[in-house]
Amino acid sequence: MKLSLLNDLRQQNPIVFNISNFVTVQDVANGINAIGASPIMSEEVAEADEMVQLAQAVCLNLGAFTEPQIKHIKVTGQLANKYHKPLVIDPVAVGAVAYRAKVAEDLLTAFQPDVIRGNAGEIAALAGVDWQAKGIDAGSGSGNLVSIAQSCAIKRRCTVILSGPTDVITDGKRTVQVLNGTPLFQTHVGSGDMLSSIVAAFCAVDPDYFEAAQTACLVFAGIGQRVAQSDPQMGSGTFIIKLMDALQQTTVAQLEELAAYD
Amino acid sequence: MKLSLLNDLRQQNPIVFNISNFVTVQDVANGINAIGASPIMSEEVAEADEMVQLAQAVCLNLGAFTEPQIKHIKVTGQLANKYHKPLVIDPVAVGAVAYRAKVAEDLLTAFQPDVIRGNAGEIAALAGVDWQAKGIDAGSGSGNLVSIAQSCAIKRRCTVILSGPTDVITDGKRTVQVLNGTPLFQTHVGSGDMLSSIVAAFCAVDPDYFEAAQTACLVFAGIGQRVAQSDPQMGSGTFIIKLMDALQQTTVAQLEELAAYD
Amino acid sequence: MKLSLLNDLRQQNPIVFNISNFVTVQDVANGINAIGASPIMSEEVAEADEMVQLAQAVCLNLGAFTEPQIKHIKVTGQLANKYHKPLVIDPVAVGAVAYRAKVAEDLLTAFQPDVIRGNAGEIAALAGVDWQAKGIDAGSGSGNLVSIAQSCAIKRRCTVILSGPTDVITDGKRTVQVLNGTPLFQTHVGSGDMLSSIVAAFCAVDPDYFEAAQTACLVFAGIGQRVAQSDPQMGSGTFIIKLMDALQQTTVAQLEELAAYD
């Protein structure tokens, strides 16, 4: 776990290009900004080539995809591969909606992601494992989360992050579990979207994406945990505001004190 | 007034499918989440059938409608009717913009809403009553709000919520007025959109939509009032954050203490 | 500097019509509302004529432009000219993305803005001055900011606001620099978008747009400075919430105390 990557990120201030979920786009932009990277968003395919070249990492969120957005996502993913920019995919609700699962399958044939980040329902769907997803939520199932994540990583040939109370990060061979976090993340729509883009920011500063992914998860979960512990009565509205403050202000030393993973 | 519906909602965690105003979509998603339901949003008509089947209630916001969105709204409203899912309509700015009034008229012929929620200017427009709306705001007029709401309910054959300092809820025969609230709701764009989706969440847990609608109004207005009373100097930015916290944390007993309606 | 314009604005509550950046649209709507104007947003060209007629000022944000949005922006700019409504343009990222620079050039031929507001990278691009922009951020360059802003104002025949730690406001002949502000503005995506729409609101209450523009800048920067000074440890999440509160609550007298410009 290379927590010092957070300092590298803040020093290098990489540009992260996002095709983003229209529901949570502002929080995602602010989260990228707060952690110390520079967000850029676009919905127009005509500027995709320039945007990908400008960026040090690309994050494609499948959270709300209209047909024009799907074309945009496809072209952008291919450009990220072409220009060797790290590519993070967030497969929102592919476990709950058959249409999304089908489109995601087409997209994952068109380009090769470096990291996929989703909840248990989403990762299970991409691994081809049976699971009961619930709308945008993780849902429930009886499978072993570590083996689901590993199956997905092997099948998709990339690093996989299965987010939840415990995050599982694996490239199919190496596996880490991040134990930090707080249930308050589940109370705010868009926490996962924000994490996906922050993972992209970390991939911009470390070419070992498995290393970058696990560090991003620990940084995000650890910062959330510190915020939640500062007030046990905290509600979901206050949490997101204080999370933004803390993304900006938390130091590597503070994270080292509470880091919990194995 | 069945305030205990709030507990039913929190226990059942119904999925509310929203075609949402692009201006306020994130607040709406977070508000649905905070009250204890589960939001799902989409802009793509190809997944409308699945989304409606997934959901326990549907809320269509006419707040920002492009031609593709209008088609999407039309299809989704018809699907909600087909699958017997409660359907809430928020007719944003139909009182101020003739184009919106015309399109809304077409839509209300294509499907049958269960609840319409709007401000005085919007409900007056749908009732065919003269009123001076101002942009997205209620505007002013001399008519009697209760009789405007009742006319609208009879004309549109559904429950109507006319929101304002006093909320009027009526199915044309039965009428309730909710007296709780705070002027801070008017200072935050999207309070009305959030209420519409919360009404849909309550309709998912009570098949008497008149009952569900009035309870949703009292819960939302009452929670806002409690938040505002906690700090008389509160500004609109702090209000929305504390409102999110309180949507999640306020109990039925706390609401019973302040409930004011007749 | 006519700080009393803030009182005029609050009294007149002008409607500002915005074609807005999808990333920051909710903050922009809330910011317009908080300062005391009334926001209206739309993405549909079929209602552009009505919207412009409803409004007392128009703000076009080039922040995320798809082809349909570009057509919408073009038509709306021409309508603002036709109906003599003050027209503010925010040329997001034209300094960083060649596609945006080209499209912006076409748009600025199609209609005549009254005010252009951008950061150094954006204004330099529109002035035809060499500058190293960085994504959506200002970037860095060696030119003199005052003369860049003046060149842009002369070339574009309008008032120009070059935003930054010091704001430069000029109509090509007259120039003012606003020295108030706080670095916290840079930590929140959308501060600039919000300022652009607030400039439009001030233009609605003073036909001397150079006067309106400089007052808007001082009001916005001064309010931000007061918020930041209230807590030296403030993070970017808390800042935007307290900024919303303060946009609503700060008085002309409080701004007069700290106003710094020359």
Image (cartoon, coloured by chain):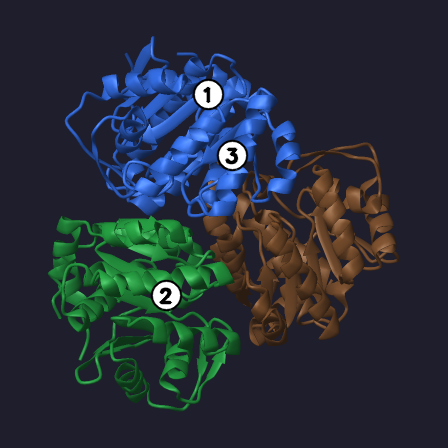
Chain colours: A brown, B blue, C green
**Dot 2: chain letter:** C
The residue type indicated by label 1 comes to Asp
- Labels 3 and 1 touching (C-beta < 8 A): no
Select label 3 or label 1 by which is in front.
Answer: 3
The residue type indicated by label 2 comes to Gly
Using the rendered image, report if marks 3 and 1 lie on a common chain: yes
In what quadrant of the picture does the C terminus of chain C appear? Answer: bottom left
Q: Residues within 10 Å of mark 1 (few under 14, many from 20)?
A: many
The residue nearer to you, when weighing C222 against C171, is: C171
In this rendering, would B185 be left or right of B34?
left
Q: Position of residue B135 (x, y in %)?
A: 27, 44
**Residue identified by numbered label 2:** C192
Question: Could one spot residue B246 in this view of the protein?
Answer: no
> Which of the numbered marks, if any, corresponds to residue B74?
3
Q: Residues within 10 Å of mark 3 (few under 14, many from 20)?
A: many
Q: Position of residue C215 (x, y in %)?
A: 19, 67
Select label 1 or label 2 by which is in front.
Answer: 1
In what quadrant of the picture does the N terminus of chain C appear? Answer: bottom left
With respect to residue A96, does C247 lie above or below? below
The secondary structure type at the circle numbered 3 is helix
In this rendering, would B26 be left or right of C49?
right
Q: Quadrant of residue A88?
A: bottom right
Q: Quadrant of residue A36?
A: bottom right
Identify the residue shown where x is 48% and y is 63%: C65
> Which of the numbered marks, if any, corresponds to residue B114?
1
Identify the residue shown where x is 24% and y is 17%: B147
